[in-house]
Image: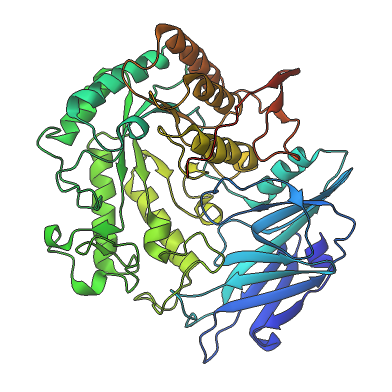
Amino acid sequence: MFVTTNTPKITTPSAELVELRSSADGLQVVLLPCNEPISYVRLTWDFDSSCYHKILSDRWGVADGDLGWINLEPVHMGYWYFTLAKADEAISFGVKTGCNCFARWRIEPNTITLTCDVRNGSGGIHLTEPLVCCTVVSAQSENNESAQQHTKRFCRMMCDKPNLADFPIYGFNTWYYTYGAITHASVLKDAELCSLLASGRVEGAPAPYMVIDDGYTGNRTAAFNGGPYPPNDDFGNMKVVAGEIHERGCTPGIWVRPLLINPKLCPQITEDCFSQNQQFSKDGFSKILDPTTNGAKEYIHDLINGMATSGYGLIKYDFTACDFMGDNFLKHNLTNGDWHLSDRTKTNAQILKDLYRLIEDAAAGSLVLSCNTYNHLVAGIHPLTRSGCDTSGHHWWLTKRNGINALVYRLAQNGTFFATDADCAAFTSEVPTDKNLLFADLIARCNSALFVSAEPDIVSPKDIDKLIEIFRISSMQPKEPIFLDWMDKQTPERFLIDGQEVFYDWGNPPCPF
């Protein structure tokens, strides 16, 4: 392993504050307590990258449509892990999942530098005991494995103990044809369609998930979708709604944003439970919780657990990355401003992992779908994670850009970190049905989580027959296809499926923005 057989230079902070512990598992980076707050730890290895031509690196959180193999520039930035490739060889560097920092890489012609972001809020951490920032790992391609095989193996190497569902995941989501304009009646109609689409699933495969996304609450406005989530008068008792969905042959699912609340509706939440960082509370009255406080923890636990015990077998929680970090949550520096958490002894990474575990535990066995979380931190905690930015029921360009890109370039994390969800194939009058059928088909054949969102009366009987077959394929948990042009295109079109080359014609939709 390159990172353990070659000693890196400690460039930040002073060398006496960092211990490097080498083992067969990798190189542990340990930060020792001191009298001053520390924000970053940096290690630099001598490494000649000049013989490599292309690089594939990851991103913070959901992928924004820009993943892919690109030509290696003199200076390249990467997050969590990256792979370098030349004609017949690949090498990867990264940190193991579940680390206690945000890890980013700088690749230059003769060096690679790892920066461990150990901040609390936007400032340094006040350590009271040694902190294992991360375990650094590396791997070289072997036994003539392809870059695709190598990247998958490296993801498995990074995640020792994934929390994986042992069943296929598929279903329906209300968002991409309603955008929140849902009713009790529309949800039950959707559940009937969802049950029909999964009616051809193989013997022993589970019922589909029918996910009620945003729009069911009585306190929702155009600018506010936070808690505490009382149902509106039309939906009434959400436990009854869950039972009605179950009667239609589906497992009920529900959406929630756990860190944002209307304080007036949560009198039990005291002022000290709110985050100093309120960049994403943009409506003038809502507030974001500080998840290190007891009051926030109790609220989040009770919210999630109440949904699980009301019969919702899937809980999709959203917005925690942006609510926690603020406006820069996907950018290089992650967060800005001047703020810290109530508990200043933990890193942002540790605090987010604690939040993810709290939600997983509160779900009490319901399947948790995390959306807008940080993939390297949520791995090993949740079994299902959104891998890309939103697809669209308005613009096929967005689905092509975000959904297909995330599906392909995050597929190495599928079944190694968690099950990946590339987001919904949307069927509306504004997007081409034939293209979304292709998208759903590829999701199923990639053995990724399959969710569709369909406007009533848009899908014809012929389209429904195709979707029933797509859901059947998904229920079979097929072997992943081989990517034939993924090193040349950010939206691959050619795949080897069951020994046959298949071409997916995504079209060339114009950018609407």
**Residue for point 53% across, 63% down:** 331
**Farthest residue, direction left:** 233
Q: Answer above or below: position of 301 versus 470.
A: below
Image quarter where the N terminus lies is bottom right
* Foreground of the two, 510 or 378: 510
Identify which residue is drawn at 52% across, 92% down.
35
Check the image and report above or below for 383 versus 8: above
Where residue 403 appears, x then y in whole percent?
53, 37
* Residue reaching furthest to the bottom: 35
Name the residue rendered at 32%, 31% in the picture.
174
Q: Is residue 421 visible?
A: no
Q: Position of residue 509 (x, y in %)?
A: 55, 32
Q: Position of residue 308 (x, y in %)?
A: 28, 40
The residue shown at (51%, 59%) is 330
Exactly how many numbered labels are in the figure?
0
Compared with 285, 214 (above or below) is above
Q: Is residue 133 visible?
A: yes
Q: Is residue 490 above or below residue 139?
A: above
The reply, left or right, for residue 412 in relation to residue 205 is: right
Q: How is the image coloured?
A: rainbow
Q: Is residue 17 left or right of residue 369?
A: right
- Name the quadrant containing residue 497: top right
Looking at the image, residue 147 sits to the left or right of residue 185; the answer is right
Task: Find residue 422 and report its horizontal and vertical position in percent.
Answer: 52, 37
